[in-house]
Each structure stands twice: as C-alpha cells, then as structure tokens.
Image (cartoon, rainbow, N blue to C red):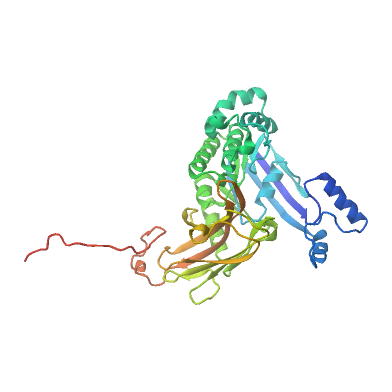
Amino acid sequence: MSDTAINVEHVWKQHRLGTINHRKMVQDLQSWWAQIRGKEDPNALVTVDGAKAASELTRHERFWALKDVSFDVREGELVGVIGRNGAGKSTLLKILSRVTTPTRGQITITGRVASLLEVGTGFHPDLTGRENVFLNGAILGMSKAEIRRKFDEIVAFAEIERFIDTPVKRYSSGMYVRLAFGVAAHLESEILIVDEVLAVGDAAFQMKCLGKMGEIGREGRTILFVSHNMAAVTSLCQRVVWLDRAELKMDGDVEAITKQYLQYGSENPGRVVIPEKIRTSSFFFESVTFYTSDGTVSALFNITSPIRIELEYRALGSIENLELFLRVHNSSGVTVFTTNRSASLPLGVTEGSYRCTIEIPPLFLAAGLYSIDLAAHIPSKLMICFCRGIASFKIEETGSTMSLYKGVGHGVVIKDLPWRETLLSPERG
C-alpha cells in the first residue's frame, strides 16, 4: 500500500485558442496556409463586421489549463478530484489517461489504466454494442480472451441485453455510459479513472456504479474519481485533490476539504459569469445572478426572504423542443429540487439573447449552503450543455421559529403546509 501508483510532478498544460482543430485535417491545413500568407481564415466561424478584429486578438491567445500541479496517489487509494467548471480536472485526467501530453512536467504511472472520460469515447457509432465491447476493450488493453470471459458480466452490468446487437448510434447517452462504464469497470486494471460522465445515467445506475467503484477499491485497485457530487465524493473517496483556476489548491482529508470547497463557492458576490471556454456553439448560459428582496445582488440570504435567480442565456439559432432546468443541491451534494422551464413556458427557443427569472419562496429552504446546476437539453435526445455547480448561495437563520430549536436538524425543506384539525371528543370537566 505504500507503493506509488501515480506520481504527478510539476505538470503544466497549455492550450491555444483560435484557428486550429476544425475537426477536418484539410480545414486545419487551409487555415494554417492562410495564416502563413497573412490571409483571412477561410474557415472562420464569425464573419460579421468587427468580428475579424476580435478574432485576431484571440488567434494566438494561450491559456494554462494546469499550472505546476504535483501530487502522488498510492496503490489502492480512492481519490476524488473536485473543482469548479474550467478548473483543469478533465485536462488532468486526459493527461493521466495518455489522451494528451503535458506541456511541462512529467507523470509516472505504475500499472494498467482503464479510463472513462467522455460519453462514447472509444466507441464507433456504426458498430453494435457487442462489437464496441470488443473494440473498446481492445483500446483499453484487454485481450480478446479476457473480453470473451468478461462479456456476459459486462452486458448484464450495463443492463442493455436487448440492445447489445443494435448499432450504438441509436443508443441514448445513458446507454452509452452504461456500456462504457461496464467495459472500463470489468477490465482487470490496476488503476480506474472516471470523469463526471456518470451523471448522464439515471439515479439507480449511478448508485450501481458507485457501488462497483467501492468494490473495485476494496480489491486494492486505485481509483481517481472526478465529480461535482460531494455526497458521492465523501461516501466513496479516502482523499480529495482540489483544483482551482488550473492550480492545486488543497490535497488531503475528504470531509475538511469538501467543506472548505463548498464554503469557498459561497464567497462569490452574487453574480457568476459562465467561462467562454465551456460555452457550446448552439446555446449557452452567459451568467447567473442572485438578488435579495430589495434588488441587491448577493449570495447571502435571510431565511425569511425570497431568493430571485436571474439567468441570462443565448441561442445562436432556433432550437425546437429545447428544455432548460435548474437543480439545487445542499452542502452534502444531495439534490433538493429541480425546476424546469417548461413548467411555465413552451419548449423551444428562437435565435436571440434571453433573461429568465426564477424565485425561491421564503421559509422554503433550511439554513445552509446550496449550489446550482444549469442544463439545456432536448428531452430524450441530446444534452446541449450542462453547467454543474456553477454558482452557490447561502441561507442564514435570522429569526424564524426554527431558530428556537438550535442544534435540531430540520432537513432541507421547511415549507409551512396547511394543517386541518377536527375536535373529535371534547374533554368534559
């Protein structure tokens, strides 16, 4: 147990914004040749007036996704990796999975690695589930004999027996994750690396995956688990690595660090601007702002006051059947409630910028720290964007009747409900 499974030494990773990675080599070559000759990029996505000057500013802009990150993971440890969106978590896992290389620094890994980073990674859409089990298993380093031996167990775990001979391009994102996790979890690897993709699955399957990771950990194998779900992190992991703005902020005790992480989120002034690098091309959230009852921007609220949440978002074209939802979690990572746009407005949006307001009534949430997720999706078809833990707010007990019972747990919802009482047998003196 004292042996080191993963050693990360002064790792830096730099990305360049601008013209490369058009997804087709010919377009990359066209853009590169135009840049060499000082010509306008023929593959520029934005061509409106003034856009060229803005594009030139970002053409050679670089940013650090990781800055001087160092830590060790011992054999058999279950380590959680936490941090806000854009903190560098996924970049770190891609480096550890050898999907990309660090700009500076080095990593040393002892043992075979199985990783689950993105939905559908290592899957070919035109192949069936059965064929993709063998393809994905081979990519992860499994022999054909090992895959055959594990095949029935993988399919049973994924619970997609009926669809195993169906091309995976017809699978939902949840089915993708079920099968992909089944392959990765049953690979006889020494190290398992799992990104936040499990959140795509339903609640029952998430619990099944967490149980499987706990079982893998008890077998003495090493796990790195990225999640915004603090309840899952605290229940599964023995240690936490906290990344913030591409740097290692803290490394150590799970309970102490997750508590500080949640409190750290509450220090925002009440308005969060969504980073451009996590915005999607068709629809994206731009900002989240919290308002008190008197219109003040704040992330701190009185338990007896309403909380107004203002969302700003933009659609770059008409999107039919678009649904938005906002989900609220407490400090333990437990989902308190979810509210959908379609409860008040029709599905779908046209091109344009929008502002939407949601109000949480007073005396509804108990005192504590809360975080929110935002998502835009086409139900049962496509997740367009998902901003996990993007903003947080805090409710303080400042004079409600609940303050009379200090130290008593009131749960997360304290809504007053109507009580109707009938006197059945009056006492007679």
Identity of the residue furthest to the bottom in this view:
294
Q: Nearer the viewer, residue 101 or 159?
A: 159
Q: Residue furthest left?
A: 429
Which quadrant is home to the C terminus?
Answer: bottom left
Query: Height in image: 201 above or below 290?
Result: above
Residue 214 shown left or right of residue 144 in the figure: left
Front-most of residues 177 and 169: 169
Residue for point 43% across, 64% down = 367
Residue 247 appears left or right of 79: right
Between 237 and 64, the residue placed more toward the observer is 64
> The N terminus is located in which quarter?
top right
Give x and y (percent) for residue 39.
Answer: 90, 58
Q: How many marks?
A: 0
Relative side of 171 to 33, left or right: left
* Vertical comparison of 11 with 351: above or below: above
Visible residue check, residue 75 = no
Front-most of 86 and 259? Answer: 86
Query: Residue 181 location in percent, x, y?
Result: 59, 37
Visible residue check, residue 280: yes
Task: Place residue 166 in its image quadrant.
Answer: top right
Instruction: Establish if 72 lies above or below 273.
Output: above
Residue 137 at what x, y percent from top left? Answer: 65, 31
In the image, farthest residue toward the right: 37
- Residue 33 placed where, x, y %? 90, 52
Which quadrant of the view contains residue 213? top right
